[in-house]
Image (cartoon, helix red, strand yellow):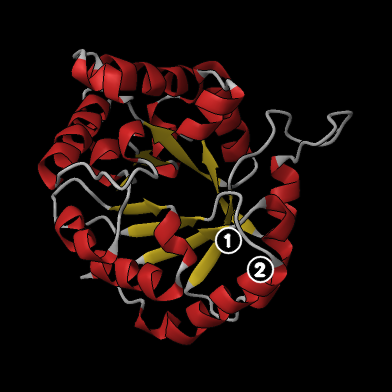
Amino acid sequence: MRKPFVAGNWKMHGSKASILNLVTGLNSMAGELDGVDVAVCPPSLYIDFTKRTLSTPAIVIGAQNMAEEPYQGAFTGEGSAVMLKDLGCDYVILGHSERRAIYGETDSEIANKVQVALKSGITPILCVGETLDERESGVMESVISAQLDAVLDVVGIAAFNFVVIAYEPVWAIGTGVTASPAQAQEVHAFIRGKLAKLDASVAEKVVIQYGGSVKPGNAKELFGQPDIDGGLIGGASLDADDFIAICKAAGV
């Protein structure tokens, strides 16, 4: 039985004052988080502050990105997996569509980052997903397969015992448009089926989150689908009440 997992991606939002307010709310409601794993992923500048502000073991810390280079070196502006581990990060989001589209990250670079994260003891949240044009032109499955295959070629199927997958249709991220539960389930089932062709046991255990305009009002129906194991939450994770409501929906 897979345990649901909900992670909040705060993206480039926050200040010390707003994070203190948000985390105070999360701390006060953390006792309601039964049956679900929960993480928050603040901007890198606020990882340590958020970690120190959280007073509950029910919520852990993740990062939003990391360098391909695992240790230290002359890489101005980058942060390594070892540094994230030193700050207490348990997870790192890799391959988010914003990193792919805005910063030009390739499938190969993302695969290398997944390998580095695993070797450093950090669980990757590997994001995959298609654009609206790709969905409408009928290449959704081939796009997602290519994103997964790049990682599989580097780390192998067994490594997915230690990887979380987040399916995020690009057309639903930050748009207010949500994939229907049936649409989301179809893709989640495709992903799990693809992995099952390589190792059925790994495929059955891998947690596959959904991300894309998840809100308290639609979370329960989305998370009720058989292959959807929680969510990677953007805007709604910046409101403590909304985020906890979404987490509770996953744990039902």
In the figure, is residue 115 to the left or right of 48? left
Tell me which numbered mark, 2 or 1, is placed earlier along the sequence.
2
User: Disc 2 to disc 1, how far (Cα)?
Assistant: 7 Å
Looking at this rendering, what residue extends furthest in the right direction?
A: 74
> Quick one: 85 or 172, which is closer to the camera?
172
Residue 107 placement (x, y as % from top left): 50, 19
Label pair 2/1, CB-CB below 8 angstroms: yes
> Residue visible at 73% across and 39% down?
80
Residue drawn where x is 22% and y is 48% of the image? 228
Residue hosting label 2: 51
The amino acid type of the residue labelled 1 equals: Ile
Front in this rendered view, residue 154 or 15 = 15
User: Picture coordinates of residue 65 (x, y %)?
Assistant: 61, 40
**For the image shown, how many numbered marks are present on the structure?**
2
Residue 141 position, x and y percent, is 24, 19
| Left or right of residue 79, residue 111 in this image | left
User: Could you classify mark 1 by the number of other residues whose Cα lies within 10 Å: few (under 14), some (14-19), or many (20 or more)?
Assistant: many
The quadrant the N terminus occupies is bottom left
**Element at badge 2?**
helix
What residue is shown with label 1? 61
Res. 106 visible in picture: yes
Near-viewer residue (17 or 202): 17
Left/right placement of residue 239 relative to residue 119 reads left
Q: From where the camera sits, is residue 95 visible?
A: no
Q: In the visual, does 189 lie left or right of 80?
A: left
